[in-house]
Amino acid sequence: MQTFAIRPYEDRDECAVVELVRELQEHEGAFYDRMLPSSEIGSWYVLRALRDARGSGGEFLVAELEGRVIGYATVLVGQSSREML
């Protein structure tokens, strides 16, 4: 049986999260011309997501399946997408 968990981000997750963000950038880049090239995504992205989440009282989470990070979410509290622009 596969073990799936959602948990707070830990420093050891950085490389896996960066790879996931790069994959998402590649996919969304086909639809939106405002996306950064995936090669420009790095540790800075994770640090910014952590800062934004924790600064709002939220959390930066990862989804893990059998010890492998397979997803992430930035949870912001009390903010709208208009404030992020």
Image (spheres, grey):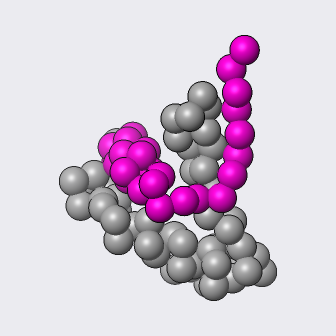
Q: Is residue 14 magenta?
A: yes
Query: Does 25 appear in magenta?
Result: yes
Judged left or right of residue 78, residue 74 is left
Which residue is painted at 62% across and 64% down in the image? 60
Question: Which secondary structure class fits the magenta region best?
Answer: helix
What range is drawn magenta here?
A: 1-29
Q: Residue furthest left?
A: 39
Residue 66, placed above or below residue 56: above
Q: Where is 15 relative to 5, above or below?
A: below
Depth check, front residue: 41 or 9: 9
Residue beneath the point at 63% across and 43% down: 63
| Residue 66, picture quadrant | top right
Side of 70 where 82 appears, left or right: right
For the N terminus, which image quadrant? top right
Question: Percent x, y for residue 69?
Answer: 53, 40
**Which sits in the foreground, 36 or 34?**
36
Camera-nearest residue between 11 and 56? 11
Q: Position of residue 67 (x, y in %)?
A: 56, 34
Considering depth in this image, is 83 or 54 the residue closer to the camera? 54
Q: Is residue 11 above or below residue 84?
A: above
Expressed as whole percent of the image width and height from the top left, the position of residue 10 reads: 54, 59
Tell me, yes or no, if residue 2 can be seen here: yes
Instruction: Look at 62% across and 74% down and name the residue there.
Output: 53
Q: Is residue 74 visible?
A: no
x and y, in percent, of residue 74 in the image: 62, 63
Q: Residue furthest right?
A: 78
* Image-based side of 72 in relation to 23, left or right: right
Please name the residue shown 63% across and 85% down the image: 55
